[in-house]
Structure formats: structure tokens, C-alpha cells
Image (spheres, rainbow, N blue to C red):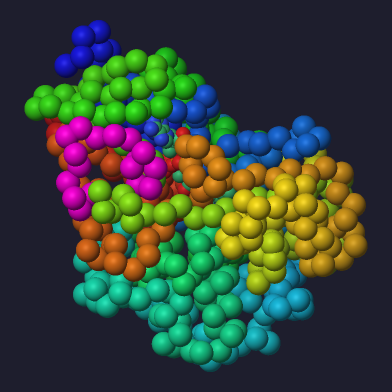
Amino acid sequence: AAAGARITDVIVIGAGLAGLAAARDLVAAGLTVTVLEARTRPGGRVGDVRTAGGLSVDGGAQFVGPTQDNMTALARDYGVAIQPTYTGGRSVFWRDGKASYFEVDHAFPPELNDPAVDAAIAEIDALSAGFPVGEPWRHPQAAELDAITFTEWIGRRSSSDLAHLILGRVSGSAVVSAPPEEVSALYMLNYYAAAGDGRNPGTYQRLMGTAGGAQESFLDGAVRIPEGIARELGERVVFGAPVRRLRQNRDHVIAHSDRGVHRGRKAIVAMSPAISGQIYYDPLLPAARRRLTTGYRMGNIGKFVAVYDRPWWREAGLSGQLVGNGSPIDVVYESYRNGKHVLIGFVAPKPMRRLDHVPANWFAAECKRALVGYFGRAAANMSDFGFVRWDNEKWSRGGPVAVTAPGVLAAHGRALREPVGHLHWAGTETTDYWIGYMEGAVRSGRRAAAEVVAELG
Ligand SMILES: Cc1cc2nc3c(=O)[nH]c(=O)nc-3n(C[C@H](O)[C@H](O)[C@H](O)COP(=O)(O)OP(=O)(O)OC[C@H]3O[C@@H](n4cnc5c(N)ncnc54)[C@H](O)[C@@H]3O)c2cc1C
């Protein structure tokens, strides 16, 4: 092993919620831990950003909901208050430039009922009930479902534009921020099945009802939770320490970071599989793991935050929520932070790609125009705004989650959590329930910590 390397029982790589939850359990089990984090802050895909006017808002993850019990418990442990999302008023369903309206406990306007859509949703729920959650490769039809995209799966049930809009665009792209024609059907069906817990199978409604599981948010920002855990871990967390190289021999893992060399008996790599491939592994990881790593791609997500002094939408009988096929924003939620009301617009995956060629201020102006189109002229009176682009974040490269195209999960999925020597894997992509969510990140970290505790006995 490298001379002068600092030695702990376990090295955790990544101080997102997965890594922090793992470290917390490892410390509670009496093990010594070092957490190496590339960024200069904890939280990863959870983090505050500042608007042009200096307001702190959630730039990444924000909402929690039912069956996300690990997050609720952490909020309690770290004294982070949870506030309900406003559920009064009607939500906007935006289809081809026209608004229709629905109550927030529905997924879309009742007049749009299409028997094929209802049947497909019922099928998703029925599949979820018996799904090998988190191990989609074990599904009896894994090979068939992983040979087609989610768009093809929908197309076999209905050819209507509405079915593709509701099931593909809204429930696929709005949730994972990737176009449904680029995502495997097996991946998406596992994602729905994961929207629950061991007692409550995932349902379409729990994932989509208030679109994206959004029910409640953290009064002072979701990042207060990773900050609380990191503070408690104290000097065990080393910031500004991207791990460049992970070596292992019979007895140890040796992590070469920008803040020195660290040695452990085990390591937990706690990040998206898509990002874990940026590390150089010596010896080479098994072929299945490498194929899996390159098969996962981060979603394309951007958040436009419009700040208002008053929640004028509530006064107009609206919830402030929108879904549909608008552009560049295709999902909107409302929220409240530091005395200000905000509308949070998620930029659809395809317009996000256009950002590579369009100046940011043009794009912000387009986002503003979109909000005015959806909600009326009052939307133009924002006191402040901010725009967060995740695809250019060096240590995330997108969000909210990494997805797979056909041909990855059925063939190589088993490598997702399978330890390689002394290396264990965490990150929301590796969870059973709530893939793509903070809850899933915490669950995955706790599962990886339990694996390590069992091995180090
Ligand atoms: C815009 C947006 C909105 C979202 N909305 C929600 C929501 O409302 N509700 C919800 O529950 N979830 C939401 N999510 C998803 C949620 O943020 C993630 O599921 C969760 O935070 C993932 O946690 P993680 O620990 O698995 O990964 P990450 O948070 O990505 O943590 C990985 C960590 O590893 C670090 N790292 C990477 N490479 C290295 C390296 N080589 N060496 C050292 N460190 C490294 C990274 O800096 C990062 O801190 C959203 C995400 C985004 C981007």
C-alpha cells in the first residue's frame, strides 16, 4: 500500500445522501470512516443555488412524499421542518399550446379520459405489484421488456397522441428527464414499481399524483439534511477530494484523491453508475460492470426558478402546478422559501440540449415567456429569477437520475450492486424503492453500509 496513506476501516466516495447515509450507519456500527467528496459541499444532487437577487432556493432535489420514511426520519433527526405543498386550486395540463385543468389529486384532466390510457395505468400498477423491485433483470419478461423503449411499450397499447403524451412525455420524461424513446421499457416499469416500499407496491398515482412524488418540501431547503449529517461526521468528511484512481489488493482499497491517498479495508462508491465510470479502477472492473457503467446515462435536467412577492396563482384558483408538452418548460411546481413564493419550471430534456447553442439569457427569456403563456400575464411580474443547469455540473453531469436504453439492464443489471473485491456500490440508481429520489439514495447507502458491516463483522 502507498506509504503515508491515511487508514480507516471504510472509505466512502461521494458525500451525496447515499454516501452520507452509509457513513452515518458505519460510524454507528463502530467502524472508522473517511468520506471523500469531490465538491466543496455535501449533498451532490441536493443543493441550494442563489437567484440573481441573492435568494437561496433548492437547485436540485426538493420534494418528499408518502412511503419515503428514511427521509422523514432524517428530517426529524436533524430538525429540518417539512412544509406541505399547496394543494388548493387547479393544475394546468398543457397540450399543444392549449390549457385544460385538473384537480391536484388527479394525474390529468378527467375529460381527457382515454380507455387505453386508463388500461395502461392499470397494467403498470398490476405489474408493479409483482415486480422484482430493484432487480428488474429477474423479471420473467426481462429480456422482452428490455428489448424495447418505453415509447414502444406505450405504442403497443395505444397509438393515440394522448397516450404518448400522458404516459410517455409526462410520466416518462417529466420524472426521469429523459425522452421516453431513449429509455428501456424494463427500466421505466421498474421505476414505477419502485414508487413505494416493502408494504406498499409502487403505483402510477404515487409517482405522478402530485407529479414526481411531490407532496412536501423542506422549509429551509433539502440540503439542510446532508449538511446536518456532514456536520455530525465532522472531520471524517474531506471536501475538494475527487477520487481519481481506486486501486485494490488482497487486503485493502487505496483511493488516490486530490487531497491525498487514503487506505481502507472496504470502500463504498456512492454515486450514479454513470459518474462512477469517471474513476480509474485498478485492476480493471469486470466487463459486466463496465458495460453497465457506460450503459447508464444521466437525464438532462434544468430548473428555472421564478420568484414572486405574492402567490398570485393561488388567488387565480390555480395550484401553480403544470404538466404537459410545453417548451422549454414542461413541468412546474410552486414552493415557498425565505418569505418568497416561487414557481419552479423544469426544462424538458430536448430543449436542454439546445442550451449548448443558445445564450443563457435568451433561454431565460424563453422560460419567462413560457410561464406567461401557461399562467397569464401575472407570471411576468417576477421579482427575481434563477436558472440551474445540471448537465454541466462536473460531478453530476445531469439529473435527476441516470437511465438506461434497451439492452443494458437485462444483460448487465446484476452488476449494479454486486461488490467487486472490496468495492461496494451505492447511489439512488442502485436502490430497491424510490430510484431517482433522495429516499432511494439513503436506502442505497444504508444497504451498502449493512453489506460492509456484515463483511467486516
Ligand atoms: C434538478 C433536480 C431535481 C430533483 N428533484 C428531486 C425531488 O424533488 N425529490 C427527490 O427525492 N429527488 C429529486 N432529485 C433526485 C435526487 O437529487 C437524487 O436522487 C439524490 O440526491 C441522489 O443522491 P446520491 O447520493 O445517490 O448521488 P449524488 O447526490 O449525485 O452524490 C454523489 C456524490 O459523489 C460526488 N462525486 C462524484 N464523483 C466523485 C469522485 N470521483 N470522487 C469523490 N466524489 C465524487 C459528487 O460530487 C456527489 O456529491 C432531483 C435531482 C435534480 C438534479
Q: Is residue 188 magenta?
A: no
Q: Which residues are magenta?
A: 273-289
The answer to which of 241 and 224 lies nearer the viewer is 241
The answer to which of 199 and 89 lies nearer the viewer is 89
Tell me the quarter of the image containing the C terminus.
top left
Q: Residue at x 22, y 63 (%)?
A: 411
- Give percent across and percent down for residue 285: 20, 42
The answer to which of 258 and 303 lies nearer the viewer is 258
- Give percent across and percent down for residue 104: 67, 68
Q: Residue at x 77, y 78 (%)?
A: 98
Q: Residue at x 69, y 56 (%)?
A: 345
- Give percent across and percent down for residue 152: 42, 80
Q: Is residue 277 magenta?
A: yes
Q: Can you say whether 81 is above or below 306 in the image? A: above
Q: Is residue 428 left or right of residue 326?
A: left
Kindly tell me whether residue 73 is visible in this rendering: no
Tell me the quarter of the image containing the N terminus.
top left
The answer to which of 299 and 355 lies nearer the viewer is 355
Which quadrant of the figure has residue 132?
bottom left
Q: Can you say whether 340 is above or below 356 in the image? A: above
Q: Is residue 377 left or right of residue 418?
A: right
- Give percent across and percent down for residue 366: 77, 58
Q: Residue at x 44, y 48 (%)?
A: 439
Q: Is residue 188 left or right of residue 211?
A: left
Kindly tell me whether residue 7 is visible in this rendering: yes
